[in-house]
Image: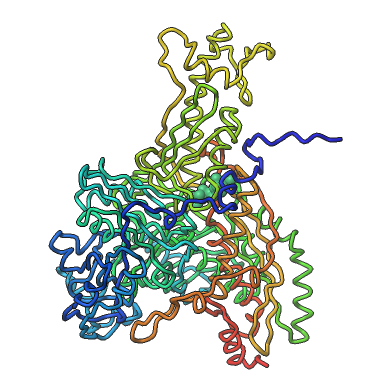
Amino acid sequence: MAVETPLKGNIGDSIRRKEDDRFIRGRGNYLDDIVLPGMLHMSIHRSPFAHARIKSINTEAASAVPGVIAVVTGALLAQHKLAWMPTLSGDTQAVLVTDKVRFQGQEVACVIATDPYVARDAASLIEVDYEVLPAVVSPQNALKPGAPLIRDEKEGQTNNHIYHWEAGDKAKTDEAFAKADRVVKLDTFYPRCHPSPLETCGIVADINSATGHATLYMTSQAPHAHRTLFAIVAGLPEQNIRIISPDIGGGFGNKVPIYPGYVVATAASLLIGKPVKWVEDRSENLISTGFARDFHMSGEMALSNEGRILGLRVKLLSDNGAFYADAQPTKFKAGLFHIVTGSYDVAAAHVEADGAYTNKAPGGVAYRCSFRVTEASYLIERLVENAAIEMKMDPADIRLKNFIKPEQFPYTSATGFEYDSGDYPRAMQLALDKLGYRELRKEQAEKRKKGELMGIGVASFTEVVGAGPGKHYDIAGLRMFDSAELRVHPTGKAILKLGVKSQGQGHETTFAQIVTEELGIPAADVEVQEGDTDNTPYGLGTYASRSTPVGGAATAMVSRKLRDKAKKIAAHLLEASEADIEFDHGKFFVRGSPSKSKTIQDVAFAAYTNLPDGMEAGLEGVTYYDPPNMTYPFGTYLVVVDIDRGTGQVKVRRMVAVDDCGVRINPMVVEGQIHGGLTEGFGIAFMQLITFDEEGNCLGSNFTDYLLPTAWETPKFEMGETVTPSPHHPIGAKGVGESATVGSPAAFVNAVIDAVGHLGITNIDMPVTSDKVWEALNKAGAAE
Ligand code: CDP
């Protein structure tokens, strides 16, 4: 009988996720599970109007409800200088309204009560006298002369324009266009969508009036950065603030910003002297917290007659809502959109971006995305598809012709990114082979003769993840590095503490595996802790797939630091010179005599019991890792669709996804990440839309209007991998968490366009719903 050796958890081992034991037994500890003695509950009264001046607020009826402890208004917060707070993009945002509401669902007043239902009922009794103002719901209208001024409280703000930003070389790009044989254009809109984590946002604020200590349990993807910002905004001493992010039920960028609810609950706890809990409901999450995208994009691609891309010109108009609250590095007003040249060797590119205020909730969070790279990837992949149609080239061939070649890495893009490594043709070839691409093209041609609509979508994305380096990338001025602290106990068991914070990505497993690889301690013996600012080293948190590139690198580096010390101790134990000690998978031995060895567990014990003279006791350390560059995962996604001419319904027949994220720590976890990302990409491409009517009413405020893909409609994914290690990451890994959400929407839409391009239909904006497809077919005279 074959005996299976249990996996120790080295890099490359698909061990089961340690954290799932508690999750599948219902023993996770989420924000709403936290109950403190004497805890009060908060509910928010929100504006029904998108744009309205507040004439008066009457809180009498609400205050009279038995169980209500306090009603907090903007006027009260203003007395404590807390009515406004800074955003992550250097703007200001109202905590509770003092002058006028600027989006539907904006926070107007809060009720604190002994029971959550009492708080909610009382909040509905708050009477607000509004003078309704005309709402501005598109950035195009917002920028028209005479448009209602949304941010009239800002000194010097005379219109709704927020920023103008450019990247790349305009003159060189103009030259490339002057020489081009052809120019392909695409105007497209990446609609507003919502990260929709299954757990909504919330806080339990517990300020001890005797000690002044504030313990804030928060659904935070970035607890350390949030602590610093709280200290600055609320004027609390930072050492007295402890932020604890408990288990988090999905974040996807939605839990990066600081929301008014967090601030009011904290202020209320400070003023009342009791813990205050606030947990938003689904509609509150959908109408008022961190949206994503909402980018109007105009792209032009200059091409030679042979199909070489010579230049790229892009104009962007961003709808930022009422407050400019994008979570992104300060220098880059449109995030990392300027990676828009994607996987292609394009000599010249120029991007111009403008942002506008509208009467919508603030947005711009990196929804499973590295700061707007998703919009960039969508635009370039859609443009290449349209170039292929116009030039009558195969969409795979035009990509192969223009890919950055493997020998060109490290490659500097026209807008200044240094791509670390890649082999794009290999990933594409694997995907084409897996799909049986050339055969399917023949089937498509046959079907087309019969009038049937079948499409094959191609997208070859390149991502940029793992911010810093700190000298270029910051959030609200805080440099983007990350950290790991490792303590090995005398019995050889370890605790790893990280500055990043999992929201379901499996860090407790995969980061332990890095320690296993570097030190030989089995992953089961490494406890991973995150999310408690008192007990973990400072870090910028988890979003934009930065945990593995930065926190993972810090883990490898701190493990190596400990290994160096362990080697000295092993030399002492083995009575040999340190220079003669070798290390292999948890064993130190004297070169040439492998039988003379000590395990890492022996060495750990000696670190506390039998040290060389003069050596400090213990086996622990901390590393703050500032990455030299970001990592550039990539892949090719292929989608096959069939379209019904009678209904416009699109059926995804197959999807092949080949991803390259460098070395995979835990291939099973990586596949899970890709599955989740593809599912979200599918939802964005075909189902999801947060839109507004002319009065600024949000028309996607629940899960019957805003559709999350379920197992019912999600297609089956066929996966493949190539491995091109990152040359600068200590273990060669690149981030992967968001690759699939970045790369897949274009693959889905390209499949639809591939099916209908010969009818002259070259664009259908997402979500590609059956009514839009039918409408386009009908216009082209091809609907049934
Ligand atoms: O920052 P975030 O955790 O969202 O994204 P990530 O760094 O891409 O990691 C997502 C999950 O996949 C983590 O558990 C990683 O450790 C794991 N991963 C992996 O096993 N191998 C890679 N090359 C990249 C990520």
Residue 444 drawn above or below residue 573: below
Q: Nearer the viewer, residue 711 or 563?
A: 711
Q: Is 34 left, or right, of 40 in this rendering?
A: right
**Residue 357 shows in this picture:** no
Q: Nearer the viewer, residue 425 or 729?
A: 729
**Residue 566 shows in this picture:** yes
Q: Is 175 left, or right, of 13 in this rendering?
A: left
Residue 185 placement (x, y as % from top left): 50, 75
Residue 682 placement (x, y as % from top left): 59, 69
When asked about the image quadrant of residue 126, the answer is: bottom left
Q: Residue furthest right?
A: 1
Residue 636 placement (x, y as % from top left): 63, 59
Q: Nearer the viewer, residue 687 or 155?
A: 687
Q: Residue at x 65, y 72 (%)?
A: 712
Q: Residue furthest left?
A: 79
Q: Quadrant of the N terminus?
A: top right
Residue 229 placement (x, y as % from top left): 27, 51
Total numbered circles = 0
Q: Residue at x 61, y 69 (%)?
A: 710
Residue 580 drawn above or below residue 125: above
When asked about the image quadrant of residue 313, the answer is: bottom left
Q: Quadrant of the C terminus?
A: bottom right
Q: Is 37 left, or right, of 372 in this rendering?
A: left
